Image: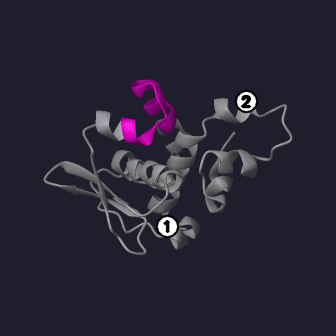
Amino acid sequence: MPKNTAIKMIKAHNTNNPFEIAAERGITLLYEPLGETLGYYNCYKRIQFIHINNVLNERLQRFVCAHELGHAILHRDSNTSFLKANTFYSIDKLEVEANSFAVELLIPDEIIYQYNDSNLSINEVAGIYGIPKEVVHLKKI
């Protein structure tokens, strides 16, 4: 389900950029000091918000946005727990689905195929696109 949803989002919005998709879907992005928290999603009075830690580097902010966008699309009415680095290892169904969505959105199959003739592993390709190594195994080809 997360892979198919990510593919639909890429086609519908003609991009795999989570910031652009969120903006086009009317989701408010908030950059704020969140301490150890990387980000979180919430919905209040039918208004969707993605909160992103403002001290993260751009690549990690991109992954966090994709992860939280996954919650916004897959779990619209669930206010999700805070995304922390240790959440990458979570076995919670909602967190695994959001991580899978983020991985599929940020490195769709077409990107993987571009590296077929290289000596790069899937982990190295994922690293180029800012995917944390802890969630690379969720990529389905």
Instruction: Point out the image quarter for the C terminus.
Output: top right
Residue 81 coordinates in the image, percent (x, y): 37, 68
Q: CA distance from mark 1 to mark 2?
A: 32 Å
Along the line of sight, the residue nearer the viewer: 55 or 40:
55
Along the line of sight, the residue nearer the viewer: 94 or 30:
30
Q: Residue, x 44% and y 60% (percent of image)?
A: 94
- Start and end of the magenta stretch? 6-20
Dominant SS type (magenta): helix
Q: Considering only vertical position in the picture, is 54 above or below 107?
A: below
Hey, what amino acid is under mark 2?
Gln
Q: Considering only vertical position in the picture, is 113 above or below 132?
A: above
Q: Residue, x 38% and y 68% (percent of image)?
A: 82
On screen, residue 106 versus residue 125, left or right, reads left
What secondary structure is marked by label 1?
Answer: loop
Along the line of sight, the residue nearer the viewer: 40 or 52:
52
Q: Nearer the viewer, mark 1 or mark 2?
A: 2
Q: Residues within 10 Å of mark 1 (few under 14, many from 20)?
A: few
Q: Residues within 10 Å of mark 2 (few under 14, many from 20)?
A: few
The tag on residue 114 is 2
Residue 1 visible to an observer of this rendering? no
Residue 67 coordinates in the image, percent (x, y): 46, 53
Residue 16 coordinates in the image, percent (x, y): 49, 34
Total labels: the figure holds 2
Precedes in sequence: disc 1 or disc 2? 1
Residue 85 coordinates in the image, percent (x, y): 52, 69
On screen, residue 64 versus residue 40, left or right, reads right
